[in-house]
Image: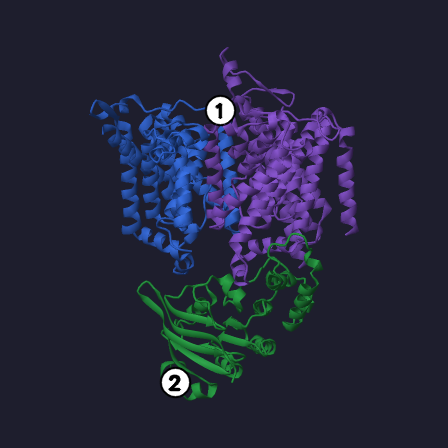
Chain colours: A green, B blue, C purple
């Protein structure tokens, strides 16, 4: 049995009188691919914002590998080993693809306030960038300006940047949003490929993707977890059908 | 006592004047996301136009015509300058309006010279409204305050009670949605820009006669107005109102207070040390009045960066 | 790469040879141009590379100048440092004040940031007259350059080389900075500071530091100014100084490294040569700035570089020349209109009218009467002809491009 890497304990978040996250308890195990599903407005994005440090929890705790990260700012959360991607593509559009990845990689080498080394001579950083380029299959476009790439390539870059800080846990927020069927298949394959052996938490609306990719699934409705289990268990859960899948089918 | 009453009254009226300018700025920012750096220049143009028209048309017609012309200028700027650079982003729009403020100041200098012009309160309005403890209070100040209040009442009613107002308020929050509903959003933007410019021009036309009308007035007021919107919270009309009044009152109260930091430190026995150190410690509060808004701004930035009534980012 | 190196060496050689080629007055102008170029390059580190628009850079330029004057006057006039090292005082004060101001202003981004920088500069400007010990009141503070390292520092030539040395050194350092990890992060800050946070970077610290560096180099520029004129007055804290550097930077092109320096040098040069001819230079500068922002959003140098890289399709040299001619004709008409207006509304003209009537004024070697039709018809015809030509060429080019597609 692998160990628990990310533990959400009685996590709550309210905006004024509105409770968006209600008493969420969830354990993510090391190495699993865990999908978070639920109807629109279920609070999936809020949960990601809480975990990644964008929002501060109202109460409850978030532990990453045993350390409390609830309420830390995004930069600190990232440095503790949790990286996320964004639903709306969030890259450095004016810089080259390689430069995007280099910025993502550099932090781990403590190069924030370095004024004396040339970026082109950072051997290990650049080797890692090349490696990432290969993984996200953008080696040929390394020098293109990120903002000029086709949409699906920008999404790949987004995932690559998330991966670049070599995190213990990766959160992907709707990586296939706005993609065609072919693009979705391609990206699913890519995600499976590059997250092998890593812990992944993913929000996605495409059920085909979820059921082929995830080891376990958590269903969130109105800010509450109504079920967690293997794809098989979720498929068969009466409660999920009623609350969520039933809606979709109907 | 009378002095304090007078100072408070002066402060509130100055605050209302500030609000007349910052209201337009806030309206335009809230709606279009553009911080119009040249907004205070509209105030200055209003003053100069009223000064120019006054000998021909008389005071009353001048203070109506001048703001209308300024509104025309505002509409022209929106239509032919801002709309052109809209695609390059908000920073670019800010820069263009900054350039415009430079050009306006230089054009004013070209026509009127780089010195104050003789624009003053007409003699039939130059009388005292009331006297308190032997001190007389100029009627014209009350008149300025009155115009400002009437202006806000009209603006408020227009925004809350009319169909156009509803469209405008909706366009502030969801411009695309409003456009999808078939309203002509560019037209609304242009109108808002015109109204904002009108307000600034009116403030200039009226206040220019009381304070001095010179080519630096735009910058001097503009900086205070920017402080107002930072303190109040950018895009918040209520915040702009509150900050305008606070800064107005603070300014006019401070002018009458002859206390320095050294005097305060003397209370805790550090008076001699402070007087020897000199510099900022021995400056009288009254001479620092002009800098108080900036200190207030720094304080707000430390304690509540989003502004008094601004939304959190 | 080799081409760039050759270009840099050629420019350096020319700059080194200038004192032999120029008159005293032009050499003085060159010193001003170098200082403006350094100031603009330092400013562009913040507003071009980091994307943080500052409206108050006069503060750091001015503080650098005052720090230098005080350093020169230290120890009874012996100076805190030998004369050639004086700009270090400007750099130090720029760095320190920049850390403080940057800490506050980078609490916010975008428009807020811009307004805070303006307010901070105005705060200093409003305080300065009250702090006579530091800023010297109306008269300012003057000082003398002491001989050091075997140089007198008495002649313009010596000052020119001192300023040149510091300017080249600082611009080289700023160029080097763009190649480092920090330099790249600064670009990231401009492109997407939100994303940088989620990559684990402390963006507030980054922003504060880039602000401080920009202020430090602006401080060096201020120091060079103080060394050049051997004085500092709180005029250097005025808004016009912040305005000038901002206009220069964006006219040249804030996002290309040498754009701001070229823009600032060119504008300072034109300002110098036209100072005897017109009183409206700032008006022209403002108009040029607005036109550049509207029609050449990347700045003049930026747009030229983009054309060289082949953006915007093949260049038709005839069309370019024709456009250029059209712009020149229109500009001539425009300048004539402005200059005549300026003359008719000047105080000199009011004085001349005391004698009665409407006397003619001199412009470009001719006399122009205010109510003569030609006085106003000529500029209008020039403007219309020039703009007409540009419009005609633009339409034809557009048709040609359509035909090609």
Tell me if I can see residue A173 in this picture: yes
User: Where's residue C97, x and y in %?
Assistant: 53, 41
Q: Is residue A67 above or below residue C50?
A: below
On the image, numbered disc 1 is attached to which residue? B113
Tell me if I can see residue C385 in this picture: no
Q: Residues within 10 Å of mark 1 (few under 14, many from 20)?
A: some
Establish whether labels 1 and 2 are both on one chain: no
- Quarter-of-image position of residue C367: top right
Q: Which quadrant of the rendered structure holds the C terminus of chain C?
A: bottom right
User: Where's residue C137, x and y in %?
Assistant: 50, 25
Residue A241, which numbered label? 2
Residue visible at 55% across and 35% down? C63
Q: Nearer the viewer, residue B296 or A220?
A: B296
- Quarter-of-image position of residue A235: bottom left
User: Circle 1 — which element?
Assistant: loop
Q: Nearer the viewer, residue C139 or B201?
A: C139
User: Where's residue B152, x and y in %?
Assistant: 29, 42
User: Where's residue C206, x and y in %?
Assistant: 55, 53
Would residue A205 appear left or right of A224 to someone viewing this image?
A: right
Would residue B104 appear left or right of C404 to someone viewing this image?
A: left
**In contact (CB < 8 Å): disc 1 and disc 2:** no
- Quarter-of-image position of residue A228: bottom left
Q: Is residue C36 above or below residue B121?
A: below
Residue visible at 56% across and 19% down? C369
Would residue C279 appear left or right of C325 to someone viewing this image?
A: left
Q: Chain of mark 1?
A: B
Q: Nearer the viewer, residue C233 or C46?
A: C233
Q: Residues within 10 Å of mark 2 (few under 14, many from 20)?
A: some
Q: Chain of mark 2?
A: A
Q: CA distance from mark 1 to mark 2?
A: 79 Å
Residue visible at 56% across and 31% down? C66
């Amino acid at each position: 049995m692998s160990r628990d890497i990310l533990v959400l304990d009685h996590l709550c978040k309210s905006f004024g009188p509105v409770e968006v996250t209600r008493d969420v308890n969830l354990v993510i195990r090391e190495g699993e691919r865990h999908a978070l599903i639920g109807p629109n407005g279920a609070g999936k994005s809020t949960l990601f914002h809480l975990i990644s440090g964008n929002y501060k929890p109202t109460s409850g705790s978030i532990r990453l590998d045993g350390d409390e990260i609830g309420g830390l700012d995004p930069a600190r959360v990232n440095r503790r080993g949790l990286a996320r991607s964004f639903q709306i593509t969030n890259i450095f559009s004016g810089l080259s693809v390689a430069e995007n990845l280099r910025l993502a990689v550099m932090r781990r080498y403590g190069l924030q306030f370095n004024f004396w080394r040339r970026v082109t001579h950072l051997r290990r950083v650049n080797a890692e960038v090349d490696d990432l380029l290969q993984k996200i299959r953008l080696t040929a476009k390394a020098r293109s300006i990120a903002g000029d790439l086709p949409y699906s390539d920008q999404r790949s870059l987004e995932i690559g940047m998330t991966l670049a800080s070599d995190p213990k846990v990766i959160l992907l927020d709707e990586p296939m949003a706005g993609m065609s069927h072919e693009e979705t298949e391609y990206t699913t394959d890519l995600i499976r490929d590059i997250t092998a052996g890593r812990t992944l938490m993913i929000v996605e609306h495409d059920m085909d993707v979820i059921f082929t990719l995830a080891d376990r699934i958590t269903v969130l409705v109105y800010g509450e977890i109504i079920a967690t289990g293997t794809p098989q268990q979720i498929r068969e859960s009466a409660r999920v059908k009623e609350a969520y899948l039933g809606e979709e089918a109907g | 006592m009378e002095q304090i009453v007078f100072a408070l009254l002066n402060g509130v009226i100055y605050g209302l004047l500030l609000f007349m300018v910052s209201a337009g700025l806030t309206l335009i920012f809230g709606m279009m996301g553009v911080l119009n750096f040249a907004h205070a220049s509209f105030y200055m143009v209003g003053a100069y136009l009223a000064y120019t028209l006054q000998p021909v048309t008389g005071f009353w017609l001048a203070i109506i015509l001048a703001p209308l012309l300024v509104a025309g200028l505002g509409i022209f700027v929106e239509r032919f300058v801002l709309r052109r650079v809209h695609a390059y982003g908000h920073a670019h729009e800010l820069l263009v309006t900054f350039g415009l403020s430079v050009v306006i100041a230089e054009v004013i200098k070209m026509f009127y010279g780089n010195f104050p012009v003789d624009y003053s309160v007409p003699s039939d309005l130059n009388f005292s409204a009331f006297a308190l403890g032997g001190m007389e209070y100029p009627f014209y100040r009350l008149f300025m305050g009155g115009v400002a209040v009437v202006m806000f009442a009209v603006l408020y009613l227009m925004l809350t009670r009319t169909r156009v107002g509803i469209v405008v308020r909706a366009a502030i929050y969801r411009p695309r949605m409003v456009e999808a509903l078939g309203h002509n959003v560019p037209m609304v933007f242009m109108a808002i820009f015109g109204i904002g410019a009108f307000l600034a021009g009116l403030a200039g036309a009226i206040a220019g006669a009381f304070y001095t009308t010179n080519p630096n007035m735009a910058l001097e007021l503009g900086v205070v107005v920017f402080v107002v919107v930072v303190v109040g919270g950018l895009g918040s009309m209520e915040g702009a109102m509150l900050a305008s009044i606070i800064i107005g009152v603070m300014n006019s109260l401070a002018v009458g207070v002859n206390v320095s930091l050294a005097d305060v430190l003397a209370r805790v026995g550090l008076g001699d040390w402070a007087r020897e150190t000199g510099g900022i410690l021995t400056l009288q509060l009254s001479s620092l009045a002009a800098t108080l808004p900036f200190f207030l701004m720094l304080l707000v930035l430390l304690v509540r960066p989003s502004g008094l009534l601004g939304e959190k980012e | 790469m080799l081409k760039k190196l050759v270009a840099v060496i050629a420019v350096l050689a020319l700059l080194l040879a200038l004192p032999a080629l120029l008159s005293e007055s032009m050499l003085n102008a060159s010193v001003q141009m170098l200082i403006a170029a350094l100031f603009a390059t330092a400013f562009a580190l913040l507003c071009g590379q980091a994307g943080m628009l500052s409206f108050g850079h006069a503060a750091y330029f001015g503080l650098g100048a005052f720090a230098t004057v005080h350093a020169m006057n230290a120890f009874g006039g012996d100076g805190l440092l030998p004369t050639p090292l004086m700009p270090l005082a400007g750099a130090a004060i720029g760095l320190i004040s920049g850390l403080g101001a940057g800490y506050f202003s980078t609490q916010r981004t975008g428009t807020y940031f811009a307004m805070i920088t303006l307010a901070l500069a105005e705060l200093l400007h409003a305080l300065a007259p009250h702090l006579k010990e530091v800023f010297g009141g109306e008269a300012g503070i003057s000082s003398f350059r002491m001989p050091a390292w075997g140089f007198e520092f008495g002649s313009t030539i010596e000052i020119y080389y001192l300023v040149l040395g510091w300017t080249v050194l600082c611009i080289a350092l700023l160029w080097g900075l763009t190649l480092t990890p920090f330099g790249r992060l600064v670009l990231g800050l401009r492109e997407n500071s939100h994303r940088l946070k989620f990559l684990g970077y402390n963006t507030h610290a980054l922003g504060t530091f880039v602000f401080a560096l920009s202020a430090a180099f602006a401080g060096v520029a201020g120091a060079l100014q103080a060394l050049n004129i051997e004085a500092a007055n709180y005029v250097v804290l005025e808004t016009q100084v912040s305005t000038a550097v901002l206009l220069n930077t964006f006219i040249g092109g804030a996002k290309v490294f040498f754009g701001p320096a070229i823009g600032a040098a060119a504008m300072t040069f034109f300002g110098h040569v036209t100072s005897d001819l017109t009183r409206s230079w700032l008006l022209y500068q403002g108009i040029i700035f607005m036109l550049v922002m509207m029609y050449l959003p990347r700045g003049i140098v930026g747009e030229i570089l983009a054309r060289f890289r082949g953006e915007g399709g093949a260049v038709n040299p005839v069309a370019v020349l024709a456009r250029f001619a059209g712009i020149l004709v229109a500009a001539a008409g425009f300048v004539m209109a402005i200059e005549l207006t300026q003359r008719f509304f000047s105080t000199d003209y009011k004085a001349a009218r005391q004698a009665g009537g409407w006397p003619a004024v001199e412009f470009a070697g001719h006399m122009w009467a205010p109510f003569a039709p030609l006085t106003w018809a000529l500029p209008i015809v020039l403007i219309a002809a020039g703009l007409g030509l540009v419009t005609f060429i633009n339409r034809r080019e557009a048709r040609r491009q359509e035909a090609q597609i």
